[in-house]
Image (tube, rainbow, N blue to C red):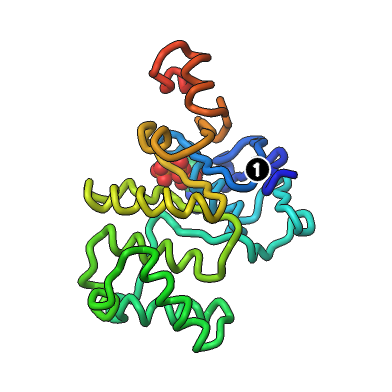
Amino acid sequence: MALIKVNNLSKRYGNKTAVNNVNFDFERGKCIALIGPNGAGKTTILRTLSGLLKPTSGTIQFADEKENSDIRPHIGYLPQYPSFYGWMTGREFLIFSGELAYLSKDEAKKRADELLKKIGISEGASNERISRYSGGMKQRLGIAQAIIHRPKLLILDEPVSSLDPIGRREVMTLMEELKNEMTILFSTHILSDADEISDELLLLHNGEIVESGSMDELRAKYQTSKIELAFE
Ligand code: ATP
């Protein structure tokens, strides 16, 4: 059974249709890239799936949940521009986030330390203020916050697009590791990022899914490495 099934999803902002009648589903354990140019509707889809936006029409069915449930405890979400309390240390921030996710203080401390290790932030750095972190460190901390409650699906909105090459590599490596533990849906406008890490791609253009499949399937279909042709 699909982990998530999206049926005829549309989202309008006033007169502007940002997402138009989108259908897709995917299985557990996959890493899916939602790829499309600026303004294609990626953020809108991800915010709708994570429950932050209400669809104008259509349904999102998550395995084991009632249809169109507003509460999505199985989803972890990292927005495109996450915000942090720069005056907190990385460790304080994760403990605080754990408590917000209803962990007891002791559980939150344990989970914070486990996650700091997983995201490669040293003990020394974890006791530094976040304002001193690099872009890659902040993004890895954001991912740790998004998975603090052990979600089944991790949604990441453009997780590497604002990073320098080192930060990008660090985050891609972390995503590669997390793929073994949970299903990941992430957005990007860079085809090579999608190619590097995802099992399946959803190509979004003007709020509509114009193609889907693995990179190999898309290459075979377009008989070229220029999948961008699908957008034309
Ligand atoms: P980007 O890569 O630039 O973040 P995106 O693919 O994530 O783009 P969205 O942010 O989902 O795209 O936007 C889709 C369309 O909806 C765009 O035309 C955008 O201008 C419009 N839009 C997004 N949010 C709003 C809003 N709150 N009110 C009105 N229009 C909006």
Question: Ligand 1 near label 1 (Cβ, under 8 Å)?
Answer: no
Question: Does any portion of residue 111 appear in the rendered image?
Answer: yes
Residue with the most extreme right position? 66
- The quadrant of the picture occupied by the N terminus is top right
Question: Does any portion of residue 206 appear in the rendered image?
Answer: no
Where in the figure is residue 16, as x and y percent of width and height?
Answer: 55, 41
Given the image, on which type of amino acid does mark 1 rest? Glu
Where in the figure is residue 109, as x and y percent of width and height?
Answer: 45, 83
In the image, taking residue 62 as reference, residue 113 lies left or right, namely left
In the image, taking residue 148 as reference, residue 25 lies left or right, namely right
Where in the figure is residue 218, as x and y percent of width and height?
Answer: 51, 21
Q: Which residue is mark 1?
A: 27
Residue shown at 65% from the left, 62% from the top: 72
Residue with the most extreme top position? 223
| Mark 1 surroundings: few (<14), some (14-19) or many (≥20) residues within 10 A | some
Secondary structure, mark 1, is loop
Residue shown at 41% from the left, 41% from the top: 188
The image quarter in which residue 94 lies: bottom left
Placement of 227 over or under 86, stated as above or below: above
Residue shown at 56% from the left, 76% from the top: 101
Tag count: 1
Where in the figure is residue 76, as x and y percent of width and height?
Answer: 54, 61
Placement of 197 over or under 206, stated as above or below: below
Who is closer to the viewer here, 204 or 181? 181
Placement of 42 over or under 103, stated as above or below: above
Residue shown at 38% from the left, 54% from the top: 174
Who is closer to the viewer here, 15 or 186? 186
Residue with the most extreme bottom position? 105
